[in-house]
Image: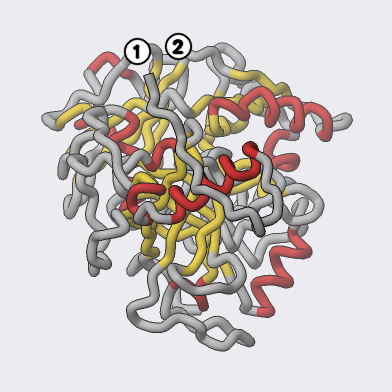
Amino acid sequence: MKPPVRFPRLSSQSPYICNNCLLRTHRTSKLATQPLHRLYSSSSPNPASPHLPPAAGFTHLPSRRLIALTGPDSTHYLQGVITANLTPSPPRTSGFYAAFLNAQGRLLNDVFIYPYTEPGKASASGNGKGEGWLIEVDAKEVTVLAKHIKRYKLRAKFDVRVLDVGERGVWSVWEEGGEGWTMHALVGSGSGSESGKEGVITCLDKRAPGMGRRFLLPGDTKPEIDAQESSEDVYRVRRYLKGVPEGQDELIREHALPQESNVDFMGGIDYKKGCYVGQELTIRTHHRGVVRKRILPIMLYGMEDGEPTSLEYDPRRGLGVEGIPRETGIGRFEKKGRSAGKFLAGVGNVGLGLCRLETMTDVLVQGEAGGYREGDEFTVQWEEEGEGKLLKIKAFVPSWHLKQ
């Protein structure tokens, strides 16, 4: 049984205060006397944090699905709706990174696109009926993107088909500091040619150094290499450490701009190609040369911890960052001012954030006074199950980012 709450005795000259108001005053004063680290929990045990990414490994990516576009007009259609050039010289023979935009220049989906021939539809007459492309997209968005393509194909002659989950699997394969593996080293002898039902479809993942290769393998085929198979959470940690966003949980549909999302830095935009949906704002931003926000890798740490000097993942740190709501604001520590950015996603003690460059980094942006000072710290604050949470957060600029 809780002890009774004892109120201070009021003098006869004091104005009347009802018991409810006095009780609230008592609770507020008690709360105000508690130290900040008592009010805001900055860490919690998280034994399920993924292990450190191995130097060489491979991961199945169930978070990615495939859409097949096949038919004589598939190339012409795609050329007009993606940010990359589908028909460069020489022609493409492997997959590449790109994005779909809406008419306002906002990002719809980040994708990989691969040359593809539909099994059983290849035509000896050369009419292109079975020839086309595979689009790799966020699994949560596969139906939405397929409907979007069908809606705007009009009278174009091509078929749109969402591949079944077990038809082809998406894999990431990497070797830090290595030259990578050839297709023949990665699959068994029964895999067949590079295209077709039994074939292997592949491309270099050029979004950032060390991302490895992308593989689309038939059925339940796995890469046959002497390396450790890891979970998709380990792949996420690799992406976050390299500053690579992926999928619409991190690249918010119809809100994210391609340059703020680093699609340009990751090789997904060809500024010399012809017209495509969303090109006007994209080209204007490029020629103005002003991008004030970028998605950057971030490291989270406790309120009592010292500011980190390098981006390092520690699987032993359970900070509960997985519970931070997407787009939670990032503020200055013990300073007032506008928001410094937004938290996007995290695992363990690392993640991604959309950061104001002149506020959270020493990158100078044209037309903006540099507001960042060495030693500036930032925080992210949220509530989870009625309990206030507070962590410090630091952004890092990847070495592969181009100088603005």
* Residue 180 placement: quadrant: top left
Query: Which residue in the structure is indicated by mark 1?
Result: 220
Instruction: Please state which amino acid type lies under the numbered disc 1.
Output: Asp
Q: Which residue is drawn at 78% across and 27% down?
A: 150
Seen from the viewer's position, the closer of residues 224 and 321 is: 321
Quadrant the N terminus occupies: top left
- In the figure, is residue 10 to the left or right of 241? right
- CA distance for labels 1 and 2: 7 Å
Q: Which of marks 1 and 2 is nearer the N terminus?
A: 2
Seen from the viewer's position, the closer of residues 196 and 353 is: 353
Mark 2 element type: loop
Marks 1 & 2, CB-CB < 8 Å contact = yes
- Kindly tell me whether residue 25 is visible in this rendering: yes
Residue 87 place in picture, x, y as percent: 61, 50
- Kindly tell me whether residue 112 is visible in this rendering: no
Residue 226 place in picture, x, y as percent: 11, 30
Residue 243 place in picture, x, y as percent: 39, 55
Instruction: Please state which amino acid type lies under the numbered disc 2.
Output: Gly
Q: Which residue is drawn at 76% across and 32% down?
A: 148
Seen from the viewer's position, the closer of residues 331 and 203 is: 331
Residue 356 place in picture, x, y as percent: 54, 69
* Residue 362 placement: quadrant: bottom left
Mark 1 element type: loop
Q: Residue at x 50, y 43 (%)?
A: 7
The residue most toward the left is 226
Question: Which numbered disc covers residue 166?
Answer: 2
